[in-house]
Amino acid sequence: MTMQKIAGNQVAMSDFSDVPQNSMPARPNLPSRLLLRCIRWQEQLKRKHAGADESETDRPHNAAQEMAAFLVRLRKAMDTPSFPLRLSSVPIRRVVTLSIPGAAGPMRARLFIPYGRVRGALLYLHGGGFVHCGLNSHYGICCRLARASGAAVLLPDYRLAPEHPFPAAIDDSQAALQWLAGASARYWGGKVAVAGDSAGGNLAAVLAQDGRAGLGPQPVMQVLYYPSLYGEKLFPSHRTYEKGYFLSRRSMEWYGDQYIQKPEHWQHPRFAPGLNPDLQGLPPAVIITAECDPMRDEGTAYAQALEKAGVKVIYCCYPGALHAFLNFYAFMPHGKAALRFGGKALKKAFAG
């Protein structure tokens, strides 16, 4: 089965010969360079004012307190929407905040309903290294996917590490997919798909494999945005973009250490789905990567492996883009384009 490789000119290719594989880093595009400059400026300010507004009595006195305080600050900062919520929801009919069953009890979620006839339902799993982000950070992303796909989109607030290590996130995601499949059968035609970015792309890929194994509903499509798929396995892009391109290799290792707490789990197929030797029979995949991203080669390798296994794959690498460029869609044209691209593929899958 032929894999379709999409680049800037949207020409179909039968192989990956033009996907960047060398060790020379590409130049980030203009919006990415502006973002990196802003980040460097903010880091300089933080270093300049470090500790200036925190008294000795307010500072944590042990490692556990320091980590807890850091997680509070990190999650507050990273669950900030990239675009005003009210404006994001203008193009869709409504957004409902609800409680759904999770693997360990009730779980908060948001359901995004587009205008017109709703066909199918999409489970969207947010990124954030299994540690942060949530219902606000990916609000606009889900609004745009609901509009582009014509499907209902569910965004669950799955449990985060390190308080809830592997496999808590995937167990909650599976529970959310079970709930969504039931809702889709009642209201939207019965079809479900899975999607996610970064760590969420990991979770979506695992759910697709679970569905094939009979461990949950079978998605009609998997849409993976710059996914993490191979655990500790190293790729050339990990080194090429290991520092200075928004997501660093050091950060990737830290996120993994928060989520994985047993050495044997680094190669577990429900954490590293790319290491699964049997990929036959999986649902069609749309895999989207960013050129200037340490995770780029993971998405490329998984697309190659799926194609080799006979799975229909559409692969797209956005030139000069950084990891997490979806979250900055408000001023990054590639972010908007990637959401439209994934949404159109989902719309076709739900209509088929």
Image (cartoon, rainbow, N blue to C red):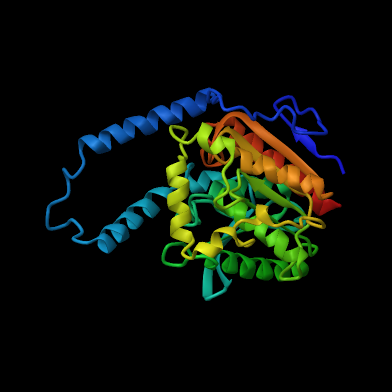
Percent x, y for residue 262? Answer: 49, 65
Residue in view at x 71 percent, y 39 percent: 341
Which residue shows up at 54% across the image and 64% down it?
Answer: 264
Nearest the viewer among 125 and 62 is 62
Vertical comparison of 176 with 120: above or below: below
- Which residue is most to the bottom? 105
Q: How many marks?
A: 0
Image-based side of 111 in relation to 107, left or right? right
Q: Position of residue 28 (x, y in %)?
A: 53, 25
Q: Is residue 52 above or below residue 28?
A: below
Q: Where does the N terminus fall, quadrant-wise?
A: top right
Relative horizontal placement of residue 7, taking residue 34 as reference (left or right): right
Residue 123 appears in the picture as rendered: no
Say which residue appears at 43% left-offset and 58% top-offset. 258
**x, y percent for residue 64:** 28, 63
What residue do we see at 70% from left, 36% from top? 316
- Can the viewer see residue 38? yes
In this view, the residue in front, 76 or 279, is 279
What is the x, y in percent for residue 226? 60, 43
In the image, 198 versus 350, the foreground residue is 198
